[in-house]
C-alpha cells in the first residue's frame, strides 16, 4: 500500500502541516475551523487543481505531495494581477479539469454549487468531452455550406442560358453559310461581265474603310458603355464611401479600447477583493464554527462571553463575528454581481472595437476601389475620344470614295455596278456575322465552365451535408452516451444509499436533473427548484460521484477527496466511503466528530485551527 505524504504551508487556515496517510480509506474528523477542509484543498492543489486558498496574512502557499515514489511541489503567490501558480501538479492539462470537477468533491466544487443553487449543469458535464468544440466545428461547416448554396443559386439557370446561346449560335452559323454561298454567287456573276480595275480598286478601298468604320463604331459603343458602367460604379462607390465614413465615424477605437481596459482593470480589482473577502469570510466562519475556542481564547465577564478578534485585536462578543460574516457574505455577493453585470460590457466593447476595425477596413477598401475605377474611367474616356476622332476621319474618307465611285459608276453599266455593291455589302455583313459567331462560341464556352463549376459545388455541398450529418450524429451519440453513463452511475448510487424519499435521479434529454421522489405517499417527478437545500446538496454530491465513475477519474488521479457530507447520515456515509474505497487508490473524506464516532474506520482527528 502506497503512502500519501502531505506537507502544506499557508493553505486556508493551515499555518504548517505535515501528514502521512497510510491507508486506502482515510477519514479526517474535526469540528468547523479545524482545517480538515484546508487539508483536502492542499491535496487537491498538489494533485493539480488550478486554485488554492492562501492563508490570510500570507503572500504564498505551498504544497508538497509524495505518492508512489514521486514528489511534486507547487506554490501559489499573491500578485497584483491575481494569484500566480508555480510548479507542476501530479496531473496537468485536461486531466486537471476531471480532478477539479469529479475528483475533488468539496463544498466549493463547481458541480455541487451549480446543483445547490439551481445553476446550469449541462456545460459542466459536457466540457470534459469537448462536445462544444464539435458543435463549433458543425457551425463552421454549416456556414461553408450556406455560402456554397448562395453561390449555387446564382448558377441555377446556367443550363437554360447555355441552351439559349447554343440555339442562337446554330442560327447564326446557318446565316453565315447562306451569306458565304450568296457571296460566291455574286462573284461568279461579276466575273462573267466586263471588269473595271479602277472601279474595283475604289470599291475595295471603300469596303476596307467601311470595315474599319464598323470596327471604330463598335469600339466607340464599347468605350461609351464602359464609361457609363464605370461612372455608375463610381457613383455607387461614392454612396458606399459616404455610408462607410458615417459608419466609421460612429466609433472611436482608441476610446473603446481604453474603456475596455479600464473595465477589465476594475474587474481585476473586484476579483482580488472577492478573494480577500472570501479568505476573511472563511476565517470568520471557522471562528464561529469552533465555538470561539483555541488559540484565540475566551473571557467571561459581566457583559457575557467576549473574544479577542483575530483581525483587529479588540474584544468583541459572538454577535460581532456573526454580523461580520453576514456583512462579508453581502459584500462578496455584491462584488460577484458587479463582475457578472459588467462582463457583458466588455463583450459589447469588444464587439464595437471589432465593428470599428471592420468599418475602417471597409472604408479603405472602398476608397481603393474608387481610385481604381477613376483611373480606368479616365483611360476609357481618352480611348473614347480617340476612337471618335478616328471614326470621323474614316467617314470623311468614305464620303470622298463614294463621290469618286459615283463618278466612275456613271460610265459603267448599272447592273454591273449593282452586283459589285451587293458583293461589298455582303462582305461587310459576312464579317459582322463571323464576329457574332465567335462571341457566341466564347459565351458558350464560359457557360460550360460555369456548369462544371456548379456541378463541383453541388458535390461539395453534398460532402458538407454528409459531414454535418456525421457531426450531428457524433454529438448526439456522445451526449446520449454521457447521459446513459451518468444515469447508470446515479442509479447504482441511489440504490446503494437507499434514500427514503428519493427513488431515482437522472439527466433528461436537455441535461436537466429530474428527481423522482415520494411526497405525502405519492410518487412524482420534480426539478431541483422544488427540493430542499439538504436534498440538493445530496444530489449534487451524487452527481459528482457519478461523474467520477462515468469519466473513469480513477485512471487520472490516485486520490478521491470528499467533504461536506452532512446531507447523509453516518450509515449511508460509511456505505458510500466503502463503495468508492474499492474504486480508487486513496480516499480522503472529511467528516464531523459526531459522524466519525459511528464509523468502524480509523480516523485522523484535527483539534485546532493551527495544529494537527
Image (cartoon, rainbow, N blue to C red):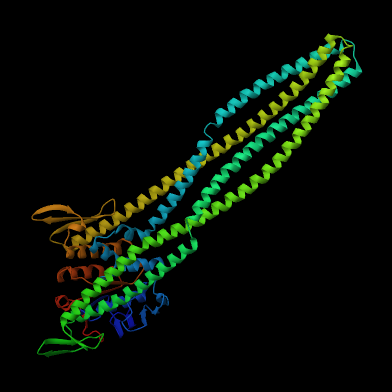
Along the viewing direction, whichever of 487 and 286 lies nearer the viewer: 286
Left/right placement of residue 96 relative to residue 164 reads left
Residue lying farthest to the right in this orientation: 197
User: In the rendered image of this protein, does residue 440 appear above or below residue 310?
Assistant: above
Expressed as whole percent of the image width and height from the top left, the position of residue 366 reads: 58, 49
Name the spot of residue 262 as percent of width and height, x first.
Answer: 42, 68
Q: Is residue 123 above or below residue 216?
A: below
- The residue at 45%/43% (across/down) is 465
At x 71%, y 30%, the residue is 218
Q: Position of residue 602 (x, y in %)?
A: 20, 79
In the picture, the quarter occupied by the N terminus is bottom left
Q: Which quadrant, please, contains the C terminus? A: bottom left
- The mark total stands at 0
Residue 161 seen in this snapshot? yes
In this picture, residue 342 sits left or right of residue 150: left
Residue farthest toward the left in the current orientation of the protein = 520
The answer to which image quadrant residue 432 occupies is top right
Can residue 108 be seen here? The reply is no
Residue 530 point in image, percent of width and height: 17, 57
Task: Work out whether 216 lies above or below 85.
Answer: above
> Residue 235: which quarter of the image?
top right
Q: Is residue 206 left or right of residue 472?
A: right
- What residue do we see at 63% from left, 34% from top? 446
Residue 513, compared with residue 94, is above or below; it is above
User: In this orientation, which residue lies closer to the viewer: 124 or 1?
Assistant: 124
Picture quadrant where residue 204 is located: top right
Seen from the viewer's position, the closer of residues 48 and 201 is 201
Amino acid at each position: 500500500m502506497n503512502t500519501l505524504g502531505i506537507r502544506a504551508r499557508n493553505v486556508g487556515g493551515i499555518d504548517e502541516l505535515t501528514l502521512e496517510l497510510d491507508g486506502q480509506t482515510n477519514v479526517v474528523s474535526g469540528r468547523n475551523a479545524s482545517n480538515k477542509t484546508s487539508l483536502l484543498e492542499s491535496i487537491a492543489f498538489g494533485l493539480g487543481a488550478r486554485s488554492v486558498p492562501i492563508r490570510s496574512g500570507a503572500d504564498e502557499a505551498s504544497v508538497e505531495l509524495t505518492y508512489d515514489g514521486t514528489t511534486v511541489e507547487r506554490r501559489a503567490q499573491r500578485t497584483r494581477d491575481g494569484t500566480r501558480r508555480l510548479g507542476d501538479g501530479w496531473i496537468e492539462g485536461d486531466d486537471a479539469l476531471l480532478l477539479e470537477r469529479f475528483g475533488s468533491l468539496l463544498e466549493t466544487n463547481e458541480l455541487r454549487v451549480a446543483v445547490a443553487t439551481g445553476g446550469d449543469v449541462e456545460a459542466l458535464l459536457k466540457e470534459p468531452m469537448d462536445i462544444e468544440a464539435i458543435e463549433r466545428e458543425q457551425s463552421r461547416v454549416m456556414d461553408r455550406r450556406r455560402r456554397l448554396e448562395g453561390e449555387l443559386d446564382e448558377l441555377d439557370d446556367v443550363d437554360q442560358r447555355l441552351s439559349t446561346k447554343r440555339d442562337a449560335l446554330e442560327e447564326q452559323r446557318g446565316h453565315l453559310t447562306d451569306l458565304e454561298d450568296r457571296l460566291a454567287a455574286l462573284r461568279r456573276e461579276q466575273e462573267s461581265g466586263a471588269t473595271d480595275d479602277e472601279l474595283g480598286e475604289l470599291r475595295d478601298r471603300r469596303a476596307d474603310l467601311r470595315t474599319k468604320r464598323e470596327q471604330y463604331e463598335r469600339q466607340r459603343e464599347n468605350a461609351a458603355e464602359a464609361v457609363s458602367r464605370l461612372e455608375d460604379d463610381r457613383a455607387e462607390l461614392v454612396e458606399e464611401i459616404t455610408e462607410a465614413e458615417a459608419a466609421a465615424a460612429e466609433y472611436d477605437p482608441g476610446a473603446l479600447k481604453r474603456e475596455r481596459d479600464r473595465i477589465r482593470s476594475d474587474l481585476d480589482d473586484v476579483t482580488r477583493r472577492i478573494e480577500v473577502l472570501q479568505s476573511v469570510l472563511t476565517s470568520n466562519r471557522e471562528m464561529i464554527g469552533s465555538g470561539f475556542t483555541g488559540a484565540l481564547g475566551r473571557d467571561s465577564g459581566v457583559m457575557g462571553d467576549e473574544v479577542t478578534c483575530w483581525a483587529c485585536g479588540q474584544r468583541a462578543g459572538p454577535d460581532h463575528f456573526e454580523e461580520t460574516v453576514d456583512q462579508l457574505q453581502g459584500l462578496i455577493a455584491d462584488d460577484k454581481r458587479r463582475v457578472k453585470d459588467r462582463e457583458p460590457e466588455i463583450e459589447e466593447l469588444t464587439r464595437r472595437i471589432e465593428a470599428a476595425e471592420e468599418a475602417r477596413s471597409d472604408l479603405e477598401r472602398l476608397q481603393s476601389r474608387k481610385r481604381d475605377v477613376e483611373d480606368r474611367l479616365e483611360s476609357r474616356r481618352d480611348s473614347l475620344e480617340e476612337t471618335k476622332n478616328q471614326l470621323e476621319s474614316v467617314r470623311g474618307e468614305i464620303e470622298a470614295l463614294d463621290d469618286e465611285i459615283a463618278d466612275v459608276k456613271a460610265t459603267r453599266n448599272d447592273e454591273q455596278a449593282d452586283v459589285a455593291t451587293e458583293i461589298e455589302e455582303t462582305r461587310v455583313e459576312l464579317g459582322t456575322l463571323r464576329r457574332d459567331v465567335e462571341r457566341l462560341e466564347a459565351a458558350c464556352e464560359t457557360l460550360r465552365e460555369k456548369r462544371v463549376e456548379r456541378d463541383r459545388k453541388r458535390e461539395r455541398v453534398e460532402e458538407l451535408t454528409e459531414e454535418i450529418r456525421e457531426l450531428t450524429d457524433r454529438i448526439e451519440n456522445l451526449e446520449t452516451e454521457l447521459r446513459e453513463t451518468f444515469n447508470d452511475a446515479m442509479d447504482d448510487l441511489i440504490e446503494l444509499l437507499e434514500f427514503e424519499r428519493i427513488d431515482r435521479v437522472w439527466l433528461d434529454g436537455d441535461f436537466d436533473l429530474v428527481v423522482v421522489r415520494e411526497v405525502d405517499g405519492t410518487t412524482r417527478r420534480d426539478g431541483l427548484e422544488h427540493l430542499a437545500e439538504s436534498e440538493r446538496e445530496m444530489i449534487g454530491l451524487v452527481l459528482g460521484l457519478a461523474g467520477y465513475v462515468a469519466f473513469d477519474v480513477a485512471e487520472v488521479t490516485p486520490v478521491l477527496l470528499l467533504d461536506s457530507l452532512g446531507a447523509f447520515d453516518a450509515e449511508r456515509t460509511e456505505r458510500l466511503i466503502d463503495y468508492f474505497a474499492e474504486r480508487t487508490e486513496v480516499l480522503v473524506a472529511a467528516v464531523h466528530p459526531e459522524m466519525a464516532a459511528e464509523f468502524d474506520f480509523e480516523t485522523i482527528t484535527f483539534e485546532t485551527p493551527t495544529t494537527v
